Image (cartoon, helix red, strand yellow):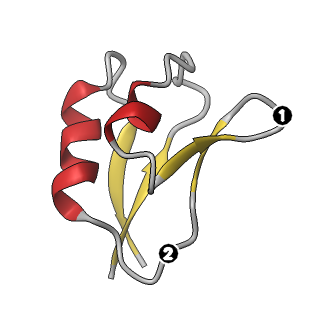
Amino acid sequence: MKVPAVELSECIRCEICTEVAPSVFRLNDAGYIEVRELDAYPAQQVDEAIMACPVDCIYWEAQ
């Protein structure tokens, strides 16, 4: 199964991913983007977030 991941050291917290795919990404209490734990991830929304990310820090990870 593939899951989305965020390279936090590159993330500028622009929150575009949370706007494009709010069911997948959220800003946590510490101020960092995190991936919600889901049984399945909507590929189209995640792919849109990957393409929209200005610093290319979102990617698919095999699990």
In the rendered structure, the answer to whether residue 11 lies left or right of residue 47 reads right
Which residue is identified by label 2?
A: 38
Residue 31 in which image quadrant: top right
Sooner in the amino-acid sequence: mark 1 or mark 2: 1
Residue drawn at (40%, 34%) of the image: 17
Residue 51: x and y in percent read 19, 32
Residue 62 in which image quadrant: bottom left
Amino acid type of the residue that numbered disc 1 sits on in the rendered structure: Ala
Residue drawn at (52%, 23%) of the image: 10
Residue 30 tag number: 1
Q: Looking at the figure, which quarter contains the C terminus?
A: bottom left
Residue drawn at (49%, 16%) of the image: 14
Residue 2: x and y in percent read 32, 73
Q: Is residue 45 above or below residue 39?
A: above
Residue 39: x and y in percent read 45, 83
In the rendered structure, the answer to whether residue 19 lies left or right of residue 44 reads right
